[in-house]
């Protein structure tokens, strides 16, 4: 009889949904599991912008500590929140099949830009002036938005998904940007939303990762049963790209790797914080030659204008 696996999770609705999925996968693999709720620093401070909090690991540190102190056996994370370098003693046990990687603009219902023809979003933005106010806590989303719409105003928006949707409706903003997967997984994607197909996602956006202690073979073997190899490869490439450029997740770096006909198609970029400068890259390689694609693409991007942007971002943080 296998021991009950203690699944550590944050308390937000989305985090619990993700942990429940892991619990179901464990059950299908023949393991009993229970959820253990851990509060994170990112859930306690809902006012300070993430990029001012030293965001790397802000949503994962508390779970890492619980894991290393043997209070839980595995931790479940949104993979985009996980630092590219895991703490000593902690290993990646599984990556679930990826959900949507896309970003969404949720338009405030009372806003003048609400239009049932949201597929014509470019026309809506252009028609309704150049001073729209858009909310997001993500420096990546902010930089890409300002690169495309330099005269718009960006406001900070923190909190879990439910809190952010409520704040949008209570504000005078035109809209706010969310991860599609987060809204869709808990059934909260509003009708008044549109996918931002032009916006590259955060590395590993839409993926769920499970971590365990390096010496816990029981938990590692239990989770390996539901590891999705394609998602694991693509997110590795994206996170290698991020690590090689800067190493942190509070930076305007985007990456997306997709598998198509035994090839990996990769797109990545880095922007200045104000969105005025941008360096981007696209690569396509055979899947059996893609293991180092993220690092190689990042090195190429650094030589194509990315190095100066990366150095400016580093200096801005000093």
Image (tube, rainbow, N blue to C red):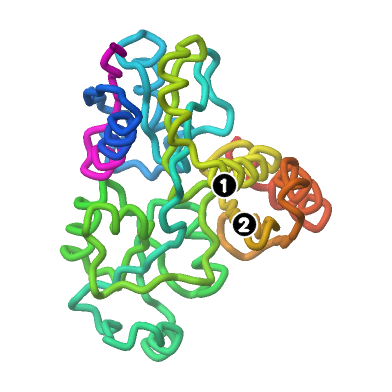
Q: N-terminal of the two: label 1 or label 2?
A: 1
In this rendering, would 148 be left or right of 216? right
User: Residue at the location (26% across, 75% down)?
Assistant: 192
Q: Which residues are magenta?
A: 1-18
Residue 6, by quadrant, is top left
User: Residue at the location (42% across, 30% down)?
Assistant: 210
Q: Is residue 26 above or below residue 105?
A: above
Q: Circle 2 sits in a helix, a strand or a loop, which is it?
A: strand
Task: Give the Cα distance between marks 1 and 2.
Answer: 7 Å
In this rendering, would 44 be left or right of 81? left
**Tag shown at residue 63:** none
Q: Residue 277 appears at what percent x and percent y? A: 66, 63
Q: Is residue 309 above or below residue 240?
A: below
Q: Circle 1 sits in a helix, a strand or a loop, which is it?
A: helix
In-front residue for pair 253/293: 293
Residue 42, by quadrant, is top left
Residue 263 among those drawn in magenta: no
In-front residue for pair 246/100: 100
Q: Mark 1 = which residue?
A: 230
Q: Residue 273 appears at what percent x and percent y? A: 57, 55
Quadrant showing the N terminus? top left
**Tag shown at residue 259:** 2
């Amino acid at each position: 009889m296998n021991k009950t696996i203690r699944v550590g999770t944050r308390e937000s609705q989305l985090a619990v949904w993700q942990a429940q999925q892991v619990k179901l996968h464990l059950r299908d693999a023949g393991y009993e599991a229970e959820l253990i709720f851990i509060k994170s620093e990112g859930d306690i401070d809902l006012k300070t912008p993430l990029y001012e909090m030293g965001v790397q690991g802000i949503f994962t540190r508390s779970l890492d500590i619980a894991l290393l102190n043997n209070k839980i056996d595995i931790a479940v994370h949104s993979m985009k929140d996980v630092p590219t370098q895991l703490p000593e003693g902690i290993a990646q046990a599984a990556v679930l099949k990826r959900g949507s990687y896309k970003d969404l603009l949720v338009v405030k219902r009372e806003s003048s830009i609400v239009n049932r023809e949201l597929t014509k979003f470019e026309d809506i933005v252009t028609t309704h002036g150049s001073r729209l106010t858009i909310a997001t806590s993500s420096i990546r989303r902010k930089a890409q938005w300002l690169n495309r719409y330099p005269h718009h105003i960006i406001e900070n928006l923190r909190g879990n998904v439910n809190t952010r949707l409520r704040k949008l409706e209570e504000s005078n903003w035109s809209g706010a940007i969310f991860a599609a997967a987060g809204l869709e997984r808990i059934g909260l994607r509003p009708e008044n939303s549109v996918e931002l197909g032009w916006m590259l996602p955060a590395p590993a956006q839409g993926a769920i990762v499970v971590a365990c202690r390096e010496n816990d073979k029981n938990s590692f073997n239990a989770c390996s049963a539901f590891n999705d190899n394609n998602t694991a490869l693509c997110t590795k490439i994206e996170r290698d790209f991020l690590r090689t450029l800067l190493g942190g997740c509070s930076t305007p770096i985007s990456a997306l790797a997709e598998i198509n006909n035994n090839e990996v198609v990769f797109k990545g970029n880095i922007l200045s914080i104000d969105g005025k400068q941008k360096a981007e890259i696209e690569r396509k390689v055979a899947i059996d030659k893609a293991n180092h694609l993220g690092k190689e693409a990042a090195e190429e991007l650094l030589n194509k204008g990315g190095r100066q942007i990366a150095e400016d971002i580093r200096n801005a943080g000093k």
